Amino acid sequence: MTRMEPADSRMYWLSAAIPNDQFLLYCFVDQQVPMADLAEGLRRRAGRVADLCLRVCDVPLSLDQPLWVHRPVTPDQVVVHAGADTWQRCLERVGSLMADQLVPTRSCWRLHLLGPVTDTPRGPAVVAVLQIVHSLGDGRRTSRIARDLFGDHELRTVAPPERDRLPPALAASSAAVRGGLAMPVRVGQMLWRGMCAFRAVRDRPPSARPGYALTRLNRPSGTQRALRVIVGDRTMLPAGDTVTTGVLTAISIALEAYLGRDVAPIGAELTIGRTRDARARNNFRNAGIDLHLEEADPAERARHIAAEMARAAEADDEPARIAERRASDTTPAILSHWGTRQFDPDRRPETVTGVTVVSSVYRGAADLTLGGGPVQFTTGFPALSPAQGLTHGVHGIGTTVAISVTTSPEIMPDVDRYIELLRAALERVATIDGRQDSGGPSESPGPDRG
């Protein structure tokens, strides 16, 4: 058994209020291997991926952080879906799967196989969708898990660690006793760290943006989902900017056209992966990035957006922010769990960090295979929330970039119109400073969705 890190515990507890399963989609060239054979091979492979042999075990009364315990892979964790033979039907099926969230105390992942699909953006393919709980990892961590699952490198058989020989219920009870005994010390640490954070924040010059006014995109989205994906090469974006900067600039142009030219200043809530090493599986934060609609020239707008992203990344290493994180992580589990239960997802905020969420992850070299078929592209679909009815995913593998749009018919009944606006915006952004002939990690999306 392994004790959860506080950041991962908060992600787990928050999922009870806002569903946050991740859906990592990979398209592979169809080699006409029977779907049942593909499923069986993936089940065997998953049994050798350490992170796919875990589940959550709650500690009584939340007297300590939940535990990661060993769980063998079972046949029902790889599901073959019949009937999704076109790209549109495939996306519709994935959208319907989002209503069936995982229960982390039972299983932390499920793999969906769809197809063969005749008309993906890159031709005939078999589609694999890894559904995985957010507490198991952020965008970078889950991408590494997927690389283990779809790679051909050698993996060792996963056996329960010696410390996992204790039955989970007994281990959880033991953790509760230890947590209860340590409570006075942990409360003292929380108070001390909290005081340090208060002083650091008090002495920091004010810099936080108050947020952005709500738009028609920032309301409850209902249960249905509408998914769309644009796939292209790295050359469809300006060579002088990172992928994330180029896509954010295109999103700013598309949103300005969709919401109306008289729209108030708007921003995007960007998830940014931290550069500091951490024990937590979720090592990121969200930051508001102004989209600078006041700049009509796309090149100037891109320059301002890039500067905003750089400032947001640097701000995370400020002493005040580090002190705040330390204070949060020393809060006893029982108080953290109580705090997440107080969150009311139905309460409408006055402002939002961004009118849309953007998640950007580079998933490595295009050397993954399924049934002998090489990977064509990969994408993902950041979850909607009661205040966010439109999200964008930016995912790269090799030199291929996929931009996903997740929304609902209640928010965007005309989602295809928005997609056309986004395509036109990408064409406009591509002309900023020429095109790039090759891609890869150096120009891959930097900021990372958790």
Image (tube, helix red, strand yellow):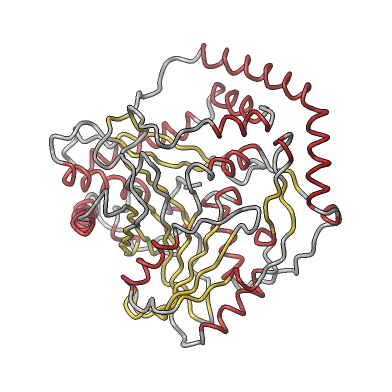
Q: In the image, what residue occupies the spot 39% across and 61% down?
A: 95
Residue 327 sits in which quadrant? top right
Tally of marks: 0
Closer-to-camera residue (48/406):
406
Residue 173 sits in which quadrant? top right
Residue 37 in the image: above or below residue 198: below
Q: Residue furthest left?
A: 261
Q: In the image, what residue occupies the spot 56% across and 16% down?
A: 200
Residue 75 sits in which quadrant? bottom right
Residue 393 in the image: above or below residue 280: below
The percent position of residue 151, horizontal first and vertical second, equals: 59, 70
Q: Is residue 204 left or right of residue 288?
A: right
Q: In the image, what residue occupies the spot 36% across and 34% down?
A: 308
Residue 289 in the image: above or below residue 237: above
The percent position of residue 351, horizontal first and vertical second, equals: 33, 29
Q: In the image, what residue occupies the spot 46% across and 35% down?
A: 313
The percent position of residue 97, horizontal first and vertical second, equals: 44, 62
Q: Is residue 401 left or right of residue 149?
A: left
The percent position of residue 221, horizontal first and vertical second, equals: 33, 47
